[in-house]
Amino acid sequence: MAGRRTYLVFVAFLLLFAFFAVVLADDGFTSRTNLLNIVRQTAPVTVMAVAVVFVLSAGEIDLSLGSVVALSALVTAKVLQTEGLALAVAAGLGVGLGIGALNGLFVTLLRLPSFLVTLASLGFVAGLARTITDLQSVAVANGGFIDVFGSGDVGPIPGLAFWGLGAVALGHFVFRHTRFGAHVVATGDDANAARVAGIRVDRVRFAVLVLSGAAAALAGILYTGRLQGATYTLGEQDLLVVIAAVVIGGTRLFGGQGSVIGALIGSLILGTLTNGLILWGFSSSEQLIAQGVLLLVAISLTLREPKGEHAS
Amino acid sequence: MVAVEELTLGLDSGEIVALVGDNGAGKSTVVKCLAGVYAPTSGRILLEGRPVRFSSPLDARRDGIEVVLQDLALANTQPVYMNVFLGRELVKGPLRWLDRHSMAAQTQTLLHELDVRVDGSSQPVRNLSGGQRQAVAIARAVLWAQRLVLMDEPTAALGVAETRRVEEVIRRMRDRGLAILLVSHSLDQVFRLADRICVLRRGKQVGVRRRADTSGDEIVAMITGLR
């Protein structure tokens, strides 16, 4: 099942990688610098993908991810201008947690679909991000911050890889090996059955949306560290990429099944694709097309599974 | 409107009592009151002589009452053992890891004891037949019920052979000392399983008969009100 799917996705990743390694042999695709770049560039998406595995598995969705990235990044960068690292990071994460909690409250208390709630907060938060800085970028000069969340290395490995892989390890453990993970999947599988079994379905829904907000905030902070500054366009394209990564990795769009490891591989596939296409000379618009096609392929494969009754 | 006006019924452990009546007689309402889904507007529920009030299904479960519903409340993408332990998963160690190994082993033992032939606790429930799925739901009730199991049309969705097998499992639950309240449309089934039969008509209790002292004709007459 999920295990076999993860294996297939991994094979797909290796094939894609091999393809670029051959085609782009003279463009330095397999150079150390480039490979580390792929890891660096995918870290924020990977962090968000881990959270979105929980969100989708619980049968919810969070469309506000991208705008939370921008607002958290801007708030972090703004606070860094006058305050220290800890306070700035706390403020950035606080933004994500707060918006996640707001989404969660609307979904659980008012029983609104998360699709609509997060569509609304997407607009609201994006507007806020544009307003607080008047569309201006905010530069970051705090060396410690840049080191921890951006260009710093741990030995030969980029620090950003640690953030990404740390999120994957923690996410995988919680998803596969804790009661919370089991309740997330049960909620997305059949919320009524879960409720009858004594699972507090609303708590699960609230928690995954808060988690998603926090992950988006961390992604915003990682972008700010890598780019040494923040702008309101950060994360704009990320929703598509994150959901594509998660779905390619074997998580069901309609809940009840997910894989954190699969999401990591999905994120690497998309990162490799983007990187390869850039080296090949494709424009960012053309990369978007490629990502969209890949998502379409992944969705076609997912929904072909013999379990159509949940799709309705 | 009152769904059920009048009912006085006692159940002993190791006993199957059938609740029968026409559509709208109030059978499901009785089950839902006992399961904590509805709160009765008046009347008392005594559990081993002690009055209880259930404000949610969780309360009823805490008092050792389990429910098996017609629409199987199972998580389809989850393995059998996770369904048996749904909402009450076992954990081990300081990190509170899910103890999948113990859950699978206990499930296997339980299914074996109930003589349910569902192989391997590892396959997802959606791969099972209707009868096997109902057997899983019943196994879950058996594992957790300490006193009473409520069954609302447990075989309504099943074929003949599967129904017989589920009935066998229900008998084995009784042999384990549980009290079972069975709601069924099938009088044949009621006569195969029940020790006593309680008849409801339009929310009122018409009477309770021992199976040995009654006949299908009498029960039908009580259900319809025609003599």
Image (spheres, rainbow, N blue to C red):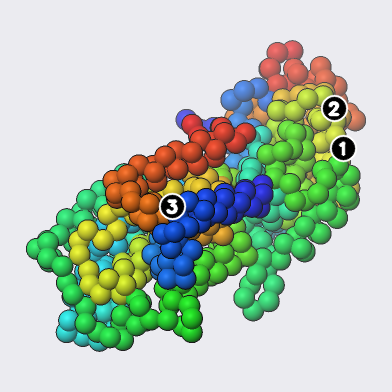
Pick the residue in front: B124 or B201: B124
Numbered badge on residue B99: none
User: Could you tell me residue A189's position as x and y percent?
Assistant: 56, 45
Q: Which amino acid does label 1 sit on?
A: Glu
> Which residue is the site of mark 2?
B161
Horizontal relation, residue A265 to residue B100: left or right: left
Q: In this view, does A24 lie above or below B212?
A: below
Label pair 1/3, CB-CB below 8 angstroms: no
Q: In which quarter of the image is residue A39?
A: bottom left
- The residue nearer to you, when weighing B159 against A68, is A68
Residue drawn at x 83%, y 20% is: B216
Q: What residue type is labelled 2?
A: Ala
Chain containing mark 3: A
Q: Residue at x 66, y 34 (%)?
A: B70
User: Which residue in the protein does label 3 denote?
Assistant: A273
> Front-most of A277 and A249?
A277
The local secondary structure at tag 2 comes to: helix
Q: What element carries label 3?
A: helix
Camera-side mark, 1 or 3: 3
Q: In which quarter of the image is residue B138?
A: top right
Task: Where is residue A92? Give x, y as percent.
Answer: 28, 72
**Foreground tag (1 vs 2):** 2
Q: How crowded is mark 2: few (under 14 residues within 10 Å), some or many (20 or more)?
A: few
Q: Where is residue B49 in the image (x, y as percent from the top left)?
A: 71, 57
Q: Which residue type carries mark 3?
A: Leu
Q: Which residue is drawn at 50% across and 42% down?
A: A298
Residue identified by numbered label 1: B168
Residue drawn at point x = 70 percent, y = 45 percent: B124
Number of disc labels: 3
